Amino acid sequence: MKLLNFLINTNLFISIAAVLFTMESQIQLDIEPAFHPYLFIIFFATLFEYNLHRLITLIFHKTALKSDKHKWLQANIRPFYLLVVFSVLGFLVSIILAKKTVLLALMPIAAVTLFYTLPVFKLKEKLMRLREVPGLKIFLIAFVWASVTVLLPVIQSEGRFDVSHILLMILERSLFIFAITIPFDIRDMQADAEVGLKTFPVIIGDKKSWQLANFSCLAYMLVSFFHYFLLDQIAASLACLLSGLIILLCLNMSKLRQSPYYHYGILDGTIIIQSLLVILFHFI
């Protein structure tokens, strides 16, 4: 349990999930799974981005450190700074080794990711983050995860792929991420409403948001199952179906929702579960 807490608190857990999600794409694209520099870029970029929120809080909003949300950060400020330096250095080394085409593809996605976190978007004489645009936050998260984990293997391989296959993969990933991200916004409803952040749960309410998460998961299962079944990728088809059922279970079991690990352990863990299922079924 200590190891799990460490992985979650440092955001190594979600960074590993991003790498496995991308390796899943390699299989679904019929590319032999292998480690490339872009996988390390994804790992270190995810690690930095997910810790960037904390870094901003630590530098500009020190009073917020007193909240329970930042309990780990309060007790581990020096290790946290080392973690940030580690992620930056790792990212720099990775981009040196990566293909130029991969880096060019990453640039617009990286810009969206930074604009999501940093207040550089001007609206009505006020600097805003993209995540503060009403209803846009969850779509940005889904877009970044889907585009990075699908497009980078495509660009790296320099192979020829059917456009419809790529678009369906991006759609599936977006639906998947959408489904498991809504509960995070439901959790933060009150805090978001207080600061005027209009997420889906704030706009449509708790109950309809859970229904939307379930609908997104069912749509993901339907699209992915028939997509890979028609491509004769039966292993991927079954793995996606099984992972979808696991997500539905996670979304609807009240006991799981009460777990302190529900969001950062269980929901984020569904990414790892799906990726491992696809990889495992492929080799079996």
Image: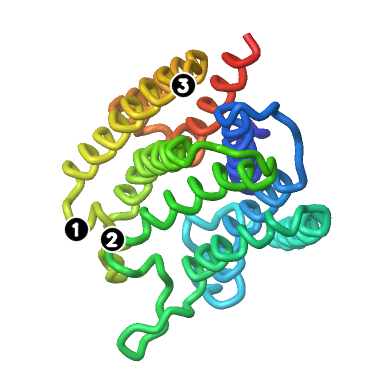
Could you give the CA–CA distance between mark 3 and mark 1, rounded to whole angstroms?
A: 39 Å
Mark earlier in primary sequence (3, 1): 1
Residue 102: % across, % down: 68, 54
Judging depth in this view, the residue of 74 and 61 nearest the camera is 61
Q: Amino acid at mark 2?
A: Gly
Q: Residue at x 61, y 67 (%)?
A: 55
Mark earlier in primary sequence (3, 2): 2
Residue receiving disc 3: 231
- Label 2 close to label 1 by CB (< 8 Å): yes
Foreground: disc 3 or disc 1:
3
Circle 3: element type: loop
Query: Which of the 4 image quadrants contains residue 282?
Result: top right
Circle 1: element type: helix
Q: Is residue 73 left or right of residue 249?
A: right
Q: Amino acid at mark 1?
A: Ile
Q: Residue at x 39, y 41 (%)?
A: 171
Query: Which of the 4 image quadrants contains residue 216?
Result: top left
Q: Is residue 263 visible?
A: no
Residue 58: % across, % down: 60, 70
Q: Amino acid at mark 3?
A: Leu
Could you give the CA–CA distance between mark 2 and mark 1, rounded to whole angstroms?
A: 8 Å
**Category of crowding for the residue at label 3, using alpha-carbon neighbours closer than 10 angstroms: few (below 14), some (14–19), many (at least 20):** few
Rendered image: mark on residue 135: 2
Judging depth in this view, the residue of 179 and 241 nearest the camera is 241
Could you give the CA–CA distance between mark 3 and mark 2, rounded to whole angstroms?
A: 34 Å
Q: Is residue 121 visible?
A: yes
Q: Residue at x 44, y 22 (%)?
A: 228
Residue receiving disc 1: 203
Rendered image: mark on residue 50: none
Q: Quadrant of the C terminus?
A: top right
